[in-house]
Amino acid sequence: MQGFDASRIAALFTDHGGTYHAARWRRPIAPVVFGVDDATLAAVKDAIEAAVATAGHFMAETDPEMGANLWFFFFAEWADLLAVPDLEGLVAGLGPLVARASAADAQQARIFRHEADGAIRAAFVFLRMSGALADVPADVLALDQALRLLAPFAEGGLSAGDTVVDGPGGATIAPRMAALLRALYDPMMPDAATEASHALRLAARLTRA
């Protein structure tokens, strides 16, 4: 299996300013999904469960502090988010986010919140279902997004082929992504890291897999 080497892993967790930040969830993931029909809801929930199980992490019905800690929003236009009751209180900076995304004609955005030590505390994904994104099969889209929410990957760091294999039987997790997530969520690894040597430790685990 061709996997991610140390330099590729480092790139996945390094932002445009050169800062390395890898992180994983410590608390159980409690998702909620808005703006889809029952069939798509089932696909999203199945995708989250598959991604979380692959990483060796776990889920819960609710988060004791927040109720939910992973939010999926599907919508037609960015401005639709401004009409969602109480969303601006939940997502700090929602107005500027909508303005930037609208100006860029973006189709998706993700926001992570972190614990004091850098572990993932909560995440939001916003999916504008128009253009090319609307043509992606629901199972492929849901699984790709679920995988991208298990760690704060750098913007543009992952291609679709890095995350999902779309075969005759439907969407499955790409083997090297599965291996990377298992390494990231290894109990011997930290919940968050800011040193690029962390990428070397992940690569070593992939080599032994």
Image (cartoon, grey):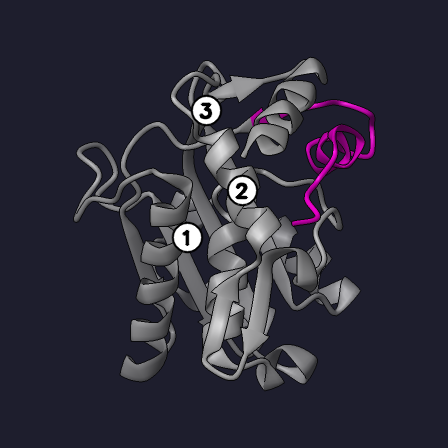
Q: Secondary structure at mark 2?
A: helix
User: CA gap, disc 3 to disc 2?
Assistant: 20 Å
Q: Amino acid at mark 2?
A: Ala
Residue name at image x 32 percent, y 73 percent: 41
Circle 3 Cα neighbour tier, 10 Å, few/some/many (<14 / 14–19 / ≥20): many
Tag 3 and tag 2, C-beta contact below 8 Å? no
Residue name at image x 46 percent, y 67 percent: 142
Q: Secondary structure at mark 1?
A: helix
User: CA gap, disc 2 to disc 1?
Assistant: 12 Å
Tag 2 and tag 1, C-beta contact below 8 Å? no
Pointer 3 or 2: first along the chain: 3
Relative to the observer, which residue lies in front, 200 or 86?
200
Q: Nearer the viewer, mark 3 or mark 2?
A: 2
Q: Secondary structure at mark 3?
A: loop
Circle 1 Cα neighbour tier, 10 Å, few/some/many (<14 / 14–19 / ≥20): many
- Classify 128 as above or below 87: below
Write down the residue under mark 1.
51
Pointer 2 or 1: first along the chain: 1
Write down the residue under mark 3.
119
Which corner quadrant of the image does residue 129 belong to?
Answer: bottom right
Point out the stretch of residues depicted in magenta: 1-22
